[in-house]
Image: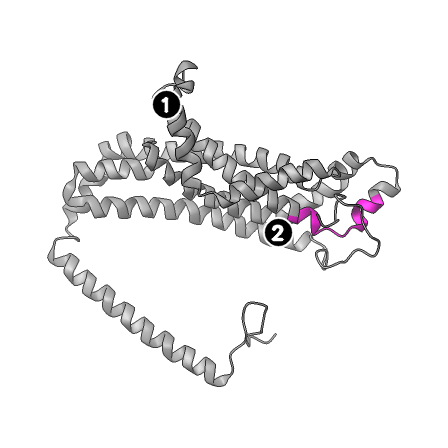
Protein backbone atom coordinates (compact mmCIF):
# COMPACT_ATOMS: atom_id res chain seq x y z
CA UNK A 1 0.00 0.00 0.00
CA UNK A 2 1.52 3.33 -1.03
CA UNK A 3 2.07 5.93 1.68
CA UNK A 4 2.53 8.83 -0.76
CA UNK A 5 0.11 11.73 -0.17
CA UNK A 6 -2.97 11.85 -2.36
CA UNK A 7 -4.93 14.87 -3.56
CA UNK A 8 -8.33 15.42 -2.02
CA UNK A 9 -10.99 18.09 -2.38
CA UNK A 10 -9.32 20.20 0.30
CA UNK A 11 -5.70 19.29 -0.28
CA UNK A 12 -3.44 19.10 -3.32
CA UNK A 13 -0.61 16.60 -2.90
CA UNK A 14 2.79 18.30 -2.85
CA UNK A 15 5.47 17.52 -5.37
CA UNK A 16 9.13 16.75 -4.47
CA UNK A 17 10.04 20.44 -4.16
CA UNK A 18 6.93 21.23 -2.12
CA UNK A 19 7.59 18.32 0.26
CA UNK A 20 11.19 19.49 0.71
CA UNK A 21 10.03 23.01 1.53
CA UNK A 22 7.38 21.73 3.93
CA UNK A 23 9.97 19.56 5.69
CA UNK A 24 12.40 22.49 6.04
CA UNK A 25 9.60 24.75 7.30
CA UNK A 26 8.62 22.10 9.84
CA UNK A 27 12.20 21.83 11.11
CA UNK A 28 12.54 25.61 11.46
CA UNK A 29 9.15 25.86 13.18
CA UNK A 30 10.10 23.05 15.56
CA UNK A 31 13.37 24.77 16.46
CA UNK A 32 11.54 28.06 17.10
CA UNK A 33 8.96 26.38 19.35
CA UNK A 34 11.65 24.50 21.30
CA UNK A 35 13.51 27.78 21.79
CA UNK A 36 10.35 29.56 22.97
CA UNK A 37 9.44 26.77 25.37
CA UNK A 38 13.00 26.71 26.73
CA UNK A 39 12.96 30.47 27.26
CA UNK A 40 9.54 30.27 28.95
CA UNK A 41 10.76 27.41 31.15
CA UNK A 42 13.81 29.41 32.27
CA UNK A 43 11.64 32.44 33.11
CA UNK A 44 9.13 30.30 35.03
CA UNK A 45 11.91 28.51 36.91
CA UNK A 46 13.32 31.89 38.01
CA UNK A 47 9.90 32.73 39.48
CA UNK A 48 9.64 29.41 41.33
CA UNK A 49 7.09 27.83 39.00
CA UNK A 50 8.57 24.37 39.51
CA UNK A 51 8.83 24.62 43.29
CA UNK A 52 7.37 21.52 44.87
CA UNK A 53 5.23 23.43 47.37
CA UNK A 54 3.36 25.24 44.58
CA UNK A 55 2.22 21.91 43.14
CA UNK A 56 1.70 20.03 46.40
CA UNK A 57 -0.42 22.63 48.23
CA UNK A 58 -3.36 22.63 45.73
CA UNK A 59 -3.26 18.81 45.74
CA UNK A 60 -3.66 18.47 49.49
CA UNK A 61 -5.94 15.58 50.38
CA UNK A 62 -8.49 17.93 51.98
CA UNK A 63 -8.54 20.09 48.86
CA UNK A 64 -9.04 17.00 46.71
CA UNK A 65 -11.91 15.72 48.86
CA UNK A 66 -13.68 19.05 49.38
CA UNK A 67 -13.01 20.83 46.10
CA UNK A 68 -11.56 18.76 43.24
CA UNK A 69 -13.81 15.71 43.58
CA UNK A 70 -17.09 17.67 44.01
CA UNK A 71 -16.11 19.83 41.03
CA UNK A 72 -15.38 16.73 38.96
CA UNK A 73 -18.74 15.21 39.91
CA UNK A 74 -20.51 18.47 39.00
CA UNK A 75 -18.81 18.47 35.61
CA UNK A 76 -19.75 14.84 34.94
CA UNK A 77 -23.33 15.46 36.11
CA UNK A 78 -23.75 18.42 33.73
CA UNK A 79 -22.17 16.41 30.89
CA UNK A 80 -24.43 13.40 31.53
CA UNK A 81 -27.65 15.42 31.74
CA UNK A 82 -26.63 17.55 28.78
CA UNK A 83 -25.89 14.42 26.73
CA UNK A 84 -29.28 12.92 27.53
CA UNK A 85 -31.07 16.15 26.61
CA UNK A 86 -29.03 16.59 23.42
CA UNK A 87 -29.67 13.00 22.31
CA UNK A 88 -33.43 13.33 22.88
CA UNK A 89 -33.60 16.64 21.03
CA UNK A 90 -31.29 15.33 18.32
CA UNK A 91 -33.50 12.31 17.63
CA UNK A 92 -36.73 14.36 17.62
CA UNK A 93 -35.38 17.14 15.41
CA UNK A 94 -33.42 14.72 13.23
CA UNK A 95 -36.54 12.71 12.50
CA UNK A 96 -38.27 15.99 11.72
CA UNK A 97 -35.52 16.77 9.19
CA UNK A 98 -36.38 13.63 7.20
CA UNK A 99 -40.15 13.82 7.70
CA UNK A 100 -42.49 13.29 4.79
CA UNK A 101 -44.25 16.55 5.63
CA UNK A 102 -42.71 19.78 4.38
CA UNK A 103 -43.99 21.84 7.34
CA UNK A 104 -42.25 19.56 9.85
CA UNK A 105 -39.06 19.56 7.78
CA UNK A 106 -39.21 23.35 7.67
CA UNK A 107 -39.62 23.74 11.44
CA UNK A 108 -36.80 21.28 12.10
CA UNK A 109 -34.54 23.06 9.59
CA UNK A 110 -35.18 26.44 11.25
CA UNK A 111 -34.33 24.96 14.65
CA UNK A 112 -31.10 23.44 13.37
CA UNK A 113 -29.93 26.49 11.43
CA UNK A 114 -30.76 28.94 14.21
CA UNK A 115 -29.28 27.13 17.17
CA UNK A 116 -26.20 25.91 15.31
CA UNK A 117 -25.44 29.53 14.41
CA UNK A 118 -25.77 30.77 18.01
CA UNK A 119 -22.73 30.80 20.32
CA UNK A 120 -23.27 28.23 23.03
CA UNK A 121 -22.23 30.76 25.66
CA UNK A 122 -25.23 32.96 24.79
CA UNK A 123 -27.61 29.98 24.89
CA UNK A 124 -26.56 29.49 28.50
CA UNK A 125 -26.30 33.11 29.54
CA UNK A 126 -29.42 34.66 28.00
CA UNK A 127 -31.99 32.23 29.52
CA UNK A 128 -30.15 32.40 32.85
CA UNK A 129 -30.36 36.20 32.84
CA UNK A 130 -34.04 36.20 31.83
CA UNK A 131 -34.83 33.75 34.60
CA UNK A 132 -32.94 35.95 37.05
CA UNK A 133 -35.23 38.85 36.12
CA UNK A 134 -38.49 36.90 36.47
CA UNK A 135 -37.49 34.32 39.11
CA UNK A 136 -39.29 31.46 37.38
CA UNK A 137 -37.07 28.70 38.75
CA UNK A 138 -37.08 30.14 42.27
CA UNK A 139 -40.89 30.11 42.25
CA UNK A 140 -40.67 26.39 41.39
CA UNK A 141 -38.53 25.73 44.46
CA UNK A 142 -35.25 25.19 42.62
CA UNK A 143 -32.26 26.31 44.67
CA UNK A 144 -29.40 28.42 43.35
CA UNK A 145 -27.14 25.51 42.40
CA UNK A 146 -29.99 23.63 40.76
CA UNK A 147 -30.82 26.78 38.80
CA UNK A 148 -27.28 27.03 37.46
CA UNK A 149 -27.27 23.35 36.54
CA UNK A 150 -30.65 23.69 34.83
CA UNK A 151 -29.57 26.48 32.49
CA UNK A 152 -26.18 24.94 31.77
CA UNK A 153 -27.85 21.67 30.80
CA UNK A 154 -30.50 23.56 28.82
CA UNK A 155 -27.88 25.39 26.76
CA UNK A 156 -25.84 22.23 26.17
CA UNK A 157 -28.94 20.27 25.16
CA UNK A 158 -30.35 22.87 22.77
CA UNK A 159 -27.07 23.53 20.97
CA UNK A 160 -25.78 19.98 20.75
CA UNK A 161 -29.28 18.72 19.93
CA UNK A 162 -29.14 20.77 16.74
CA UNK A 163 -25.73 19.33 15.86
CA UNK A 164 -26.81 15.75 16.60
CA UNK A 165 -29.95 16.24 14.50
CA UNK A 166 -27.77 16.98 11.48
CA UNK A 167 -25.61 13.96 12.24
CA UNK A 168 -28.75 11.80 12.38
CA UNK A 169 -30.06 13.24 9.11
CA UNK A 170 -26.70 12.61 7.44
CA UNK A 171 -26.67 9.05 8.76
CA UNK A 172 -30.13 8.37 7.32
CA UNK A 173 -29.39 10.02 3.98
CA UNK A 174 -26.13 8.07 3.68
CA UNK A 175 -28.05 4.79 3.56
CA UNK A 176 -28.77 3.31 0.17
CA UNK A 177 -32.40 4.22 -0.72
CA UNK A 178 -33.00 0.57 -1.50
CA UNK A 179 -33.12 -0.13 2.23
CA UNK A 180 -36.27 1.98 2.68
CA UNK A 181 -37.70 0.72 -0.61
CA UNK A 182 -37.31 -2.87 0.59
CA UNK A 183 -39.21 -2.03 3.77
CA UNK A 184 -42.08 -0.46 1.81
CA UNK A 185 -42.02 -3.36 -0.66
CA UNK A 186 -42.79 -5.91 2.06
CA UNK A 187 -45.72 -3.85 3.32
CA UNK A 188 -44.18 -1.89 6.18
CA UNK A 189 -45.60 1.52 6.89
CA UNK A 190 -43.32 4.57 6.89
CA UNK A 191 -42.90 4.56 10.67
CA UNK A 192 -42.18 0.84 10.74
CA UNK A 193 -39.66 1.20 7.94
CA UNK A 194 -37.88 3.95 9.83
CA UNK A 195 -37.91 2.10 13.16
CA UNK A 196 -37.10 -1.40 11.95
CA UNK A 197 -34.97 -0.89 8.85
CA UNK A 198 -33.51 2.60 8.52
CA UNK A 199 -32.75 3.77 12.05
CA UNK A 200 -30.79 0.69 13.24
CA UNK A 201 -28.41 1.03 10.30
CA UNK A 202 -28.20 4.83 10.53
CA UNK A 203 -27.45 4.68 14.27
CA UNK A 204 -24.66 2.18 13.67
CA UNK A 205 -23.15 4.38 10.94
CA UNK A 206 -23.30 7.62 12.90
CA UNK A 207 -22.37 6.31 16.36
CA UNK A 208 -18.71 7.44 16.21
CA UNK A 209 -19.77 10.95 15.15
CA UNK A 210 -22.34 11.09 17.96
CA UNK A 211 -19.79 10.03 20.56
CA UNK A 212 -17.28 12.55 19.22
CA UNK A 213 -19.88 15.30 19.63
CA UNK A 214 -20.52 14.18 23.20
CA UNK A 215 -16.80 14.58 23.91
CA UNK A 216 -17.12 18.19 22.74
CA UNK A 217 -20.16 18.58 24.99
CA UNK A 218 -18.11 17.42 27.97
CA UNK A 219 -15.53 20.14 27.34
CA UNK A 220 -18.27 22.73 26.82
CA UNK A 221 -19.43 22.24 30.42
CA UNK A 222 -16.59 24.63 31.30
CA UNK A 223 -18.82 27.41 29.94
CA UNK A 224 -20.86 27.04 33.11
CA UNK A 225 -18.14 29.23 34.61
CA UNK A 226 -20.03 32.35 33.40
CA UNK A 227 -23.05 31.50 35.57
CA UNK A 228 -20.81 30.39 38.47
CA UNK A 229 -21.74 26.72 38.13
CA UNK A 230 -19.30 24.86 40.43
CA UNK A 231 -17.59 22.80 37.73
CA UNK A 232 -13.89 22.01 37.39
CA UNK A 233 -12.95 25.38 35.91
CA UNK A 234 -14.93 27.39 38.47
CA UNK A 235 -13.53 25.50 41.45
CA UNK A 236 -10.02 25.61 40.00
CA UNK A 237 -10.27 29.39 39.91
CA UNK A 238 -11.47 29.39 43.53
CA UNK A 239 -8.60 27.14 44.62
CA UNK A 240 -6.18 29.32 42.69
CA UNK A 241 -7.36 32.42 44.53
CA UNK A 242 -6.87 30.68 47.87
CA UNK A 243 -3.36 29.62 46.81
CA UNK A 244 -2.35 32.74 44.91
CA UNK A 245 1.21 31.51 44.35
CA UNK A 246 -0.14 28.35 42.70
CA UNK A 247 -2.77 29.91 40.45
CA UNK A 248 -1.14 28.82 37.17
CA UNK A 249 -0.37 25.39 38.58
CA UNK A 250 -4.04 24.94 39.56
CA UNK A 251 -5.19 25.84 36.05
CA UNK A 252 -2.71 23.35 34.59
CA UNK A 253 -4.04 20.64 36.93
CA UNK A 254 -7.61 21.42 35.82
CA UNK A 255 -6.54 21.32 32.17
CA UNK A 256 -4.91 17.93 32.76
CA UNK A 257 -8.14 16.55 34.29
CA UNK A 258 -10.11 17.78 31.25
CA UNK A 259 -7.51 16.15 29.01
CA UNK A 260 -7.80 12.81 30.79
CA UNK A 261 -11.61 12.86 30.54
CA UNK A 262 -11.64 13.85 26.86
CA UNK A 263 -8.81 11.45 25.99
CA UNK A 264 -10.61 8.55 27.68
CA UNK A 265 -13.82 9.25 25.80
CA UNK A 266 -11.90 9.72 22.54
CA UNK A 267 -10.35 6.27 22.94
CA UNK A 268 -13.86 4.84 23.37
CA UNK A 269 -14.90 6.63 20.16
CA UNK A 270 -11.91 5.12 18.35
CA UNK A 271 -12.78 1.61 19.51
CA UNK A 272 -16.44 2.01 18.55
CA UNK A 273 -15.51 3.45 15.16
CA UNK A 274 -13.15 0.55 14.47
CA UNK A 275 -15.77 -2.02 15.38
CA UNK A 276 -18.61 -0.38 13.47
CA UNK A 277 -16.49 0.17 10.35
CA UNK A 278 -16.03 -3.60 10.06
CA UNK A 279 -19.80 -4.12 10.02
CA UNK A 280 -20.83 -1.37 7.62
CA UNK A 281 -21.20 -2.60 4.08
CA UNK A 282 -18.60 -1.17 1.76
CA UNK A 283 -19.92 1.58 -0.47
CA UNK A 284 -23.13 2.02 1.52
CA UNK A 285 -22.69 5.78 1.56
CA UNK A 286 -21.85 6.08 -2.13
CA UNK A 287 -24.82 4.34 -3.72
CA UNK A 288 -26.96 6.76 -5.69
CA UNK A 289 -30.73 6.27 -6.01
CA UNK A 290 -31.77 4.80 -9.33
CA UNK A 291 -35.41 5.75 -8.76
CA UNK A 292 -36.49 9.31 -7.84
CA UNK A 293 -37.47 9.34 -4.18
CA UNK A 294 -40.40 11.09 -2.62
CA UNK A 295 -39.34 14.24 -0.78
CA UNK A 296 -38.75 13.48 2.87
CA UNK A 297 -38.52 9.74 2.37
CA UNK A 298 -35.51 8.02 3.98
CA UNK A 299 -32.56 8.31 1.65
CA UNK A 300 -34.09 11.19 -0.32
CA UNK A 301 -32.33 14.56 -0.25
CA UNK A 302 -34.24 17.23 1.68
Magenta residues, start to end: 170-182
Q: Position of residue 242 (x, y in %)?
A: 17, 36
Q: Residues within 10 Å of mark 2 (few under 14, many from 20)?
A: few
Vertical placement of residue 188 versus 268, above or below: above
Q: Residue at x 57, y 36 (%)?
A: 87
| Location of mark 2 (residue) | 275
Which corner quadrant of the image does residue 125 belong to?
top left
Q: Nearer the viewer, residue 226 or 209?
A: 226
Left/right placement of residue 54 relative to residue 225 reads left
Vertical placement of residue 284 versus 22, above or below: above
Q: Position of residue 295 (x, y in %)?
A: 77, 45
Magenta-drawn stretch contains 177: yes
The local secondary structure at tag 1 comes to: helix
Q: Nearer the viewer, mark 2 or mark 1?
A: 1
Left/right placement of residue 221 relative to residue 300 reads left
Q: Position of residue 264 (x, y in %)?
A: 45, 47
Q: Nearer the viewer, residue 225 or 78?
A: 225
Which numbered tag is attached to residue 189? Answer: none
Vertical placement of residue 274 versus 13, above or below: above
Q: Residue at x 32, y 76 (%)?
A: 28
| Location of mark 1 (residue) | 133
- Can residue 231 be seen by looking at this rendering? no
The local secondary structure at tag 2 comes to: helix
Amino acid sequence: MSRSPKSTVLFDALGPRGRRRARNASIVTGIVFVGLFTLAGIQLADQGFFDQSRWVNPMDILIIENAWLPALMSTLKAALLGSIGALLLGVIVGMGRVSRFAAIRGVAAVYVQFFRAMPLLLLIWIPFTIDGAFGATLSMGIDAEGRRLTFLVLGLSVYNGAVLAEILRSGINALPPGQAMAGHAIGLRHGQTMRLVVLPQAVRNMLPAVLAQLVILLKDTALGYVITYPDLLHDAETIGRNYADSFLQVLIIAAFVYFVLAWGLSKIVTVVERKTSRKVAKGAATVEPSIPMEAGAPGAKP
